Image: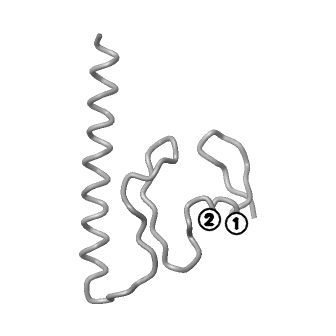
Amino acid sequence: DFVTDFDGRRVLADDLAVRYGAAVAPTVVLLDHRGQLLVKRLLGITTPDYYGVYLDAAIKQSLLRLREQLALAQNEAAE
């Protein structure tokens, strides 16, 4: 199976999985618009009782980083 990469190219889904270290399920990677990791990936479920907490924290941190990137880009565009 093929997927579209961040630069618009079609790549094998397996190659994309290898790139982001997705060897087990579930693996969660939160990426910016260039395909760069925003936070450390969540790999598997080691503690089911806390998985939702870890996922929520990763999403929150990713949103903060995206907002920082946006603010930086807006500041650069304004200069």
| Residue drawn where x is 68% and y is 56% of the image | 3
As helix, strand or loop, the secondary structure at mark 1 comes to helix
- Crowding at label 1, few (<14), some or many (≥20) Cα neighbours within 10 Å? few
Q: Is residue 24 above or below residue 71?
A: below
Mark 2 surroundings: few (<14), some (14-19) or many (≥20) residues within 10 A: few
Q: Is residue 27 above or below residue 12?
A: below
73 or 3, nearer to the observer: 73
The answer to whether mark 2 and mark 1 are in CB contact below 8 A is yes
Q: Which residue is mark 2?
A: 17
Question: Which quarter of the rendered picture does the N terminus lie within?
Answer: bottom right
Residue 29, given in percent of the width and then of the height, sits at: 46, 62
Q: CA distance from mark 2 to mark 1?
A: 5 Å
Give the residue pinned by disc 1: 14
Q: Quadrant of residue 13?
A: bottom right
Query: Compared to 27, does 19 lie above or below?
Result: above
Color style of the picture: one colour
Amino acid on which disc 2 is placed: Ala
Q: Residue 46 occupies which quadrant of the picture?
A: bottom left
Quarter placement of the C terminus: top left
Question: Residue at left 32%, top 43%?
Answer: 66
Could you tell me the amino acid type at mark 1?
A: Asp
In the image, residue 21 lies at what x, y percent? 56, 66
Q: Secondary structure at mark 2?
A: helix
Horizontally, residue 37 falls left or right of residue 71, namely: right
Of residues 21 and 55, which is closer to you in this image?
Answer: 21
Side (left or right) of 16 relative to 26: right
Name the outermost residue toward the top: 79
**Residue drawn at x 44%, y 53% as measured from the top left:** 37
The x, y position of residue 17, in whole percent, is 62, 65
